[in-house]
């Protein structure tokens, strides 16, 4: 399975970046390729959610839908997520927000499998680049919001 690992330095405290990331319902307001996110379930302590996502893949003129479970850890400033169901075969990973001097490091790992029948290696590489680009765009959008840009 492909694995994408990214790090982004953010000029904001780790807790501030974590708080922006945790407010997933606001993502469509500042993430261009995200059509909607709906919270379907939320634990009493609000640290576990099931959300439904609808993303846009403009190059292919299609939407991609999935449900994921997130487990937020306010002590570790971390979110572990995994696919519950959707258009992908599998997806899991984490976001972690690490204090770094006067700012923070946003660390992300995504492992996914997206098999499209009759698709060759060239298209799989394009899908990987799109997944990596979308993850990078999400991270940069969260960072910009946390930095007040």
Image: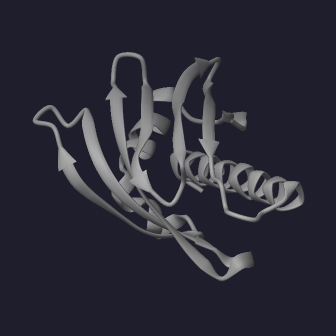
Residue 29 image point, x, y percent: 45, 69
Residue 123 image point, x, y percent: 82, 62
Residue 122: image quadrant is bottom right
Residue occupying the point 86% across, 54% down: 121
Residue 101 image point, x, y percent: 65, 17
Question: Measured along the vertical axis of the image, is residue 12 above or below residue 143?
Answer: above
In this rendered view, identify the residue nearer to me: 57 or 29. 57
Question: Measured along the vertical axis of the image, is residue 87 above or below residue 82?
Answer: below
Residue occupying the point 68% across, 36% down: 1
In this rendering, position of residue 89 left or right of residue 117: left
- Quadrant for the C terminus in the image: bottom right
What is the residue that sits farthest to the right in this orientation?
Answer: 122
What is the residue that sits farthest to the left in this orientation?
Answer: 44
In this rendered view, identify the residue nearer to me: 125 or 94. 125
Residue 9 image point, x, y percent: 70, 33
Residue 129: image quadrant is bottom right
Residue occupying the point 53% across, 42% down: 91
What is the residue that sits farthest to the bottom in this orientation?
Answer: 61
In this rendering, position of residue 126 left or right of residue 140: right
Residue 78: image quadrant is top left
The color scheme shown is one colour
In this rendered view, identify the residue nearer to me: 99 or 2. 2
Residue occupying the point 72% across, 38% down: 2
Question: Measured along the vertical axis of the image, is residue 3 above or below residue 66?
Answer: above
Number of marks = 0
In this rendering, position of residue 29 left or right of residue 42: right
């Amino acid at each position: 399975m492909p694995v994408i690992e990214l790090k982004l330095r953010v000029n904001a405290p780790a807790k501030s970046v974590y708080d922006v990331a945790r407010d997933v319902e606001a993502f469509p307001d500042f993430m261009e390729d995200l059509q909607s996110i709906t919270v379907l379930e939320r634990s009493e302590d609000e640290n576990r959610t099931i959300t439904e996502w609808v993303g846009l893949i403009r190059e292919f003129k299609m939407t991609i839908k999935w449900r994921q479970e997130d487990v937020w850890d306010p002590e570790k400033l971390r979110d572990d997520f995994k696919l519950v169901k959707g258009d992908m075969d599998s997806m899991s990973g984490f976001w972690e927000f690490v204090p770094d001097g006067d700012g923070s490091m946003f660390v992300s790992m995504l492992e996914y499998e997206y098999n499209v029948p009759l698709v060759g290696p060239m298209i799989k590489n394009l899908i990987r680049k799109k997944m990596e680009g979308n993850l990078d765009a999400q991270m940069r959008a969260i960072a910009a919001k946390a930095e007040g840009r």
